Image (cartoon, rainbow, N blue to C red):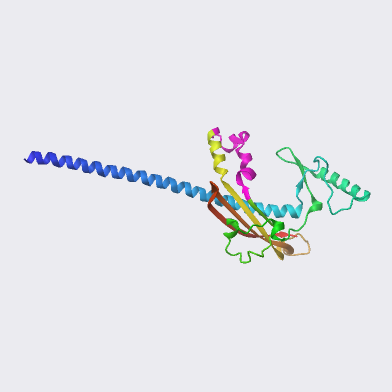
Amino acid sequence: MKNKNEKGFALILSLTLLLVMSLLGGSLIVITSSDHQSNNTSDEYQQAFYVAETALLEAEKDIINTMMGEWIDPNQDGGVPMRESIDVTDENVAAHNSYVTQLQASQVSKTDGSNLARDIDGRTIPQNVSQAASGLDTDTECFNSFKNIVNKDTIQVVKHKRAQSFLDLIISPLLDEANFIVVDPLATEAQMEKERERMSEYFFEYFSVNLGSVAFRGSGSSLKKTTTNVQKQGTQYKLYGCGYLRKNGNIEILIPLETIVTLES
């Protein structure tokens, strides 16, 4: 009887240990899967943050280009058109042709082979305009994520850019076949294609508001001054930008950022 009891106990102990090991194994699988999902989510939030930072940089670049003159092709087909506000007279046509010659002399070559020059005659200080003129859409998830905007119906902005593809407008050249080795020497074609698909789900949006003129301290070079700082006049802008992850037409992650920049007038 004693031997039979011992054999029965061993069987029960074995089954108990098997059950415990199965539970531990299942728990490890669940924990590992949860950690993997958490890492993926963390990576998506981090990438959305980088895209939001890109939105602020693009907003600032947009303003700077307007102040310094947009990039144009001085050799474009049909020639550089005269501004609609200028009357077509012999004198104005001659002045325009001279300006085009000036642009051609100052053009710079881009990596894509194009030659561009800044349209310095078209430079201006970006101003707030009506919602229709700026393309402002106050119903986007990005715009409504900024709870500090109280005058939603009457606010005027400089410009509003929506649904800008992070892949197409920013990093597409890095993921072209010719740059595979530079980006990742070990990456395969399938891996790069997977990365392109992942990046195609990220978008950014931005709008900017002219806050008016402001005096600021900037570096100076006057020999009559004992200090290296002089007061300058500039224009202050508040930039709003969002980076977001969109899957199947729905925004799953949205990161809003804002900053203030002062540009010398």
Visible residue check, residue 228: no
Q: Quadrant of residue 103?
A: top right
- The residue sitting at the right extreme is 90
Residue 162: percent from the left, percent from the top?
A: 63, 52
Count of residue discs: 0
Visible residue check, residue 13: yes
172 part of magenta stretch: yes
The quarter of the rendered structure image containing the N terminus is top left
Q: Quadrant of residue 60?
A: bottom right
Please name whichever residue, 78 or 68, is drawn nearer the observer in this view of the structure: 78
* Drawn side of residue 44 relative to residue 1, left or right: right
**Main secondary-structure element of the magenta-colored stretch:** helix
Please name whichever residue, 259 or 248, is drawn nearer the observer in this view of the structure: 248
- The residue sitting at the left extreme is 1
- Identified at 31% across, 42% down, the residue is 25
- Identified at 57% across, 63% down, the residue is 147
Residue 38: percent from the left, percent from the top?
A: 44, 49
* Drawn side of residue 20 relative to residue 168, left or right: left
- Identified at 58% across, 50% down, the residue is 51
Residue 7: percent from the left, percent from the top?
A: 13, 39
Residue 79: percent from the left, percent from the top?
A: 83, 42
In magenta, the rendered stretch is 163-189
The quarter of the rendered structure image containing the C terminus is bottom right
175 part of magenta stretch: yes
